[in-house]
Image (tube, grey):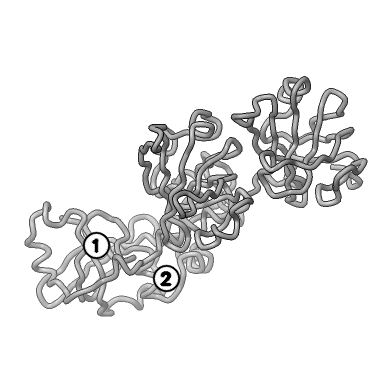
Amino acid sequence: MSEDSTTISTLEYGCSGGALQVRILRTWTPQIRSYETWFLAVDKHGDTIQILGQKKDQGHIKSILTISNCYTISDYACAEPDEYQNCIGKEIYISVGNASSICRIPDTRIIPTTSFRFISKIQIPDYVKQDPDFLGVFVKFRELTTKNKEPYTLLILTTESDEEIAIGLWKECTNVVEKFDRNLIEATPAPTVLAVTNAKIMTVAGALKVGTTSASHVYINPSIPETAALLDRFMRNCTSRSACKGPPTPLYDINEKPYSELLDKTFTVKASAVNITFTNNWYQVLCPLCKTSSFKKGNDWFCTSDGMVTTPIFMYKLSTTLTDTTDSITTNLSNNTVEKLTSITSEKAIQQYGHTHRKTLPPFIQNCKGLQKKMGITNDQKLECGQHSLHNN
């Protein structure tokens, strides 16, 4: 990559603009301006800009620029977008055509492969005209219609602050499989993180609503640190809705209940761990994209499906026998439970003891035996209250 190339941050309206080296991240054609094709590009500094190929130049530019590839672009113009063209809040865009020089260059790690502008739910009022991006754990789809009987899909996400956000998915997004693949979303193992780009914030009946635009893309488990952090928080989180409440249920009563009365139920118990066991390893490291095991490779982690994993999900993988004055029960320990018992995060524990104690319990886990705690227990291995999962043996 040339050290002398122009960067996006130096561009301004009317400037001559030297050779610009960028990666193409995504593309779209506006529904009401089919003669325009836009591209989102990013440079080595992570700055982004919109690139336009239109009218008689449109087909030529579409045949040259492809998503994920890197290019050197010269002989372009820097123009000002109108309110319908501006999707990233920049004061200028690049216009290219038959007279432009566009040369593909070898892929390079120097130029980022992603770029997002995420905001939280509480920030929505401040981004009404800026088409921001949203990140959350997929909850469900809902099929709705407008007052004019126009069908649309409502996407429900849970954000990092454990709030639900609803995003209207309109046909200019849902009808293009490169932008939105519902079948793949529903087939991806849960929990699934979705990133929705370039969402329009509108006032409807006095309330702010979020919906997609022609520029919107829905990404599944994007390979970014925020995805791993959100998944980790989701799997750890003990919200007030599922907090352990009420008097403890004796273990004997749980053991005596039929399966139908245990399914998807959470019981509060007060018990001690008489032993702590594991199968193969006391921890697991998952790929944030496919949720399958990652393997140690040097100082890093490797997924056989997705390659090197930069932000893996670390989790304890332990079982225990709980006992109280009435009975005993064998359970799985959730990641959150072990972290609360040991005061050591799974990531720190794996980094510190994963090599030396891979087949034996580290001392800090052994020390948890015999501790009496109030906890939640469920039979379906969901992380209710961030506590135990009950197995009916």
Type of amino acid under label 2: Pro
Residue 331 image label: 1
Question: How many C-alpha atoms fall within 10 Å of the one at disc 2: few (<14), some, or many (≥20)?
Answer: some
Callout 1 amino acid? Thr
Q: Earlier in the sequence, mark 1 or mark 2?
A: 1
Q: Quadrant of the N terminus?
A: top right
Marker disc for residue 362: 2
In this rendering, would 288 be left or right of 386? right
CA separation, marks 1 and 2? 20 Å
Which image quarter holds the C terminus?
bottom left
Front-most of 259 and 345?
Answer: 259
Image point 38% across, 32% down: which residue? 149
Q: What residue do we see at 10% from left, 62% from top?
A: 255
Decide if residue 299 is on the left or right side of residue 81: left
Q: Position of residue 292 (x, y in %)?
A: 44, 46
Residue 163 percent across, percent down from the top left? 42, 60
Q: Residue at x 14, y 71 (%)?
A: 249
Q: What SS does tag 2 mark? A: loop
The vertical placement of 374 against 312, above or below, is below
Image coords of residue 70 (percent x, y)? 75, 36
Question: Could you tell me which residue is drawn at 74 percent across and 26 percent down?
Answer: 54
Residue 286's label in the rendered image is: none
Q: Left or right: where does residue 138 sit relative to residue 258?
A: right
In the image, residue 20 sits, relative to residue 116, either above or below, namely above
